Amino acid sequence: MGVPMVVMPQWTDQPTNSKLVEGLWKVGVRVKVDENSGLVGREEVELCVRRVMGEGEMGIEMKRNAKKWRELAIEAVNEGGTSDKTIDEFVSRLASV
């Protein structure tokens, strides 16, 4: 949590998740599949890893965004955070049934 990602969606929800990672949250890059072979080559993987680990503008932005989302997630699960409150409420409702 808190590091940029290289995503390679395969099925079900993964294509949607990869679009969020790359396009909306800007915390990673999606590998491109070779149209002829249907495979992802090592060169493509290397390029994507270099992008997310790089010190260029894109790499710096992804690292900054990943750190921001990490901090928000930690805040949510800490005591009194939104996730903490939600699970407490769920357990209380479940126990009252």
Image: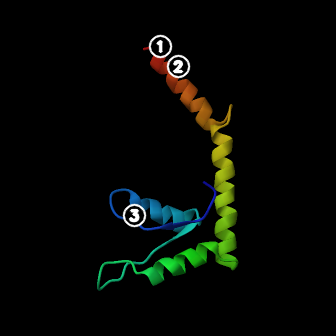
Q: Earlier in the sequence, mark 1 or mark 3?
A: 3
Residue located 59% across and 36% down the image: 83
Instruction: Classify mark 1: residues with Cα within 10 Å, few (<14), some (14-19) or many (20+).
Output: few
Give how far apart the Cα atoms at labels 3 and 2 are.
Answer: 35 Å
Residue at mark 2: 92
Label disc, if present, on residue 96 of the rendered structure: 1
Residue located 40% across and 60% down the image: 14
Amino acid type, residue under disc 3 in the picture: Pro
Residue 75 position by quadrant = top right
Residue 10 position by quadrant = bottom left
User: Where residue 68 sits in the image (x, y, percent)?
Assistant: 69, 56
Residue at mark 3: 15
Instruction: Classify mark 2: residues with Cα within 10 Å, few (<14), some (14-19) or many (20+).
Output: few
Residue 93 relative to residue 63: left or right: left
Amino acid type, residue under disc 2 in the picture: Ser
Contact flag, marks 1 and 2 (Cβ < 8 Å): yes
Give how far apart the Cα atoms at labels 1 and 2 are.
Answer: 6 Å
Front position in the image: 80 or 40: 40
Q: Residue furthest top?
A: 96
Q: Earlier in the sequence, mark 3 or mark 2?
A: 3
Contact flag, marks 1 and 3 (Cβ < 8 Å): no
Instruction: Classify mark 3: residues with Cα within 10 Å, few (<14), some (14-19) or many (20+).
Output: some
Residue 49 relative to residue 44: left or right: right
User: Where residue 89 sits in the image (x, y, percent)?
Assistant: 55, 25
Amino acid type, residue under disc 1 in the picture: Ser
